[in-house]
Amino acid sequence: MGKMSLKRQALERIGKNWSKAKHTREKLLSNVSQFAQFIESSYHLERIENLKPGMITAYAADMAAQGLSASTRASRMTAVREVCGAIGKQGICAKENMAYDIERIRVNPQPVDQDKLAEIRGALVERAAAGNRIALMMVAADALRDVFGLRAKESLMSSGIVIKDGKEHLSVEGAKGGRPRLLPIDSDKKAEAVRLVQETSRTLGNGTGRIIPHELSLQQAYDAQRNRWSALGGTRALGANQHGQRHVHAREMKSEGASKAEIMADLGHGENRSSAAYGV
């Protein structure tokens, strides 16, 4: 059996990354492939685990020499960090793109059409009332996204309650990079959303406490939620995709006096993520 290419090694270490949307996943794997091919052709590296910091710097310089845009280079560096994390060598790649002379990418805050969101919610509630199990799941997930600002996957997986400092917190599962976090249940709306999750879990027969119907896998539930939300008009173009709810949550936190650091921590972002993308 011949030796395994660096590209194949990198892709196997990364895995399929089902936590990401299809387009995002395909883009990530494509960028991982390009990086691995560059390293193999430039350094004839035989094992991806032997990756060195200088090789990453050379890759960044090569992208700049090609005249690639800052956004493209930043996207490809995200793939490099995924590879480094997969081989247990996160420290060999700088966290900040500026270390590789890649300018910060400014992202405009996402506009949200509240009327469209209300229309989608109304349709889901109607279907849930008729006993549609996917709709029941989606209504509960929407409630979590609305009051806690969760990601789509997090809204399907989070249901556990943890007592910290004498107060109840929602334990958020499914975060990017596996970074768990606790969010305080500090309002009537949040408490109501958590109760709905618990009731929905019992109704759908999921012994884990999650709102995913017992007959569905996490991936099937994730796909069903995304596809049905989009079919109801929940797209970014119409100002009503699920991620937009996080933008609304962030701006509401700002209006209530939360600092940028507090907002980013609440959303589950690392220190190097710009809050400007959320309009805060």
Image (cartoon, rainbow, N blue to C red):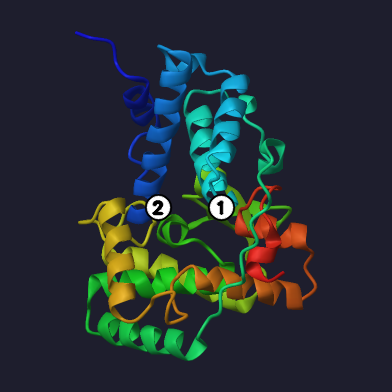
- Provide the secondary structure element on which disc 1 rests: helix
81 sits left or right of 29 in the view? right
Kindly check if marks 2 and 1 are in contact, taking CB atoms under 8 A apart as contact.
no
Q: Residue at x 71, y 42 (%)?
A: 98
Point out residue 100 in the picture as x, y percentages from the top left corner. Answer: 67, 36
The residue under label 2 is 24
Q: Residues within 10 Å of mark 2 (few under 14, many from 20)?
A: few
Nearest-to-viewer mark from 2 and 1: 1
Point out residue 208 in the picture as x, y percentages from the top left corner. Answer: 36, 51
Point out residue 264 in the picture as x, y percentages from the top left corner. Answer: 68, 58
The residue under label 1 is 71
Residue 11 visible, this orientation: yes
- The three-letter code of the residue at mark 1 reads Ser
Q: From the viewer's perspective, is residue 254 above or below residue 266?
A: below
The quarter of the rendered structure image containing the N terminus is top left
Front one among 71 and 184: 71
Q: Between marks 2 and 1, how big is the CA–CA gap? A: 14 Å
- Provide the secondary structure element on which disc 2 rests: helix
Front one among 7 and 131: 7
The first of marks 2 and 1 along the sequence is 2
Q: From the viewer's perspective, is residue 12 above or below residue 119?
A: above
State which quadrant residue 267 falls in: bottom right
Point out residue 28 in the picture as x, y percentages from the top left corner. Answer: 41, 44
Q: Residue at x 36, y 62 (%)?
A: 211
Q: From the viewer's perspective, is residue 159 above or below residue 251?
A: above
- The three-letter code of the residue at mark 2 reads Thr
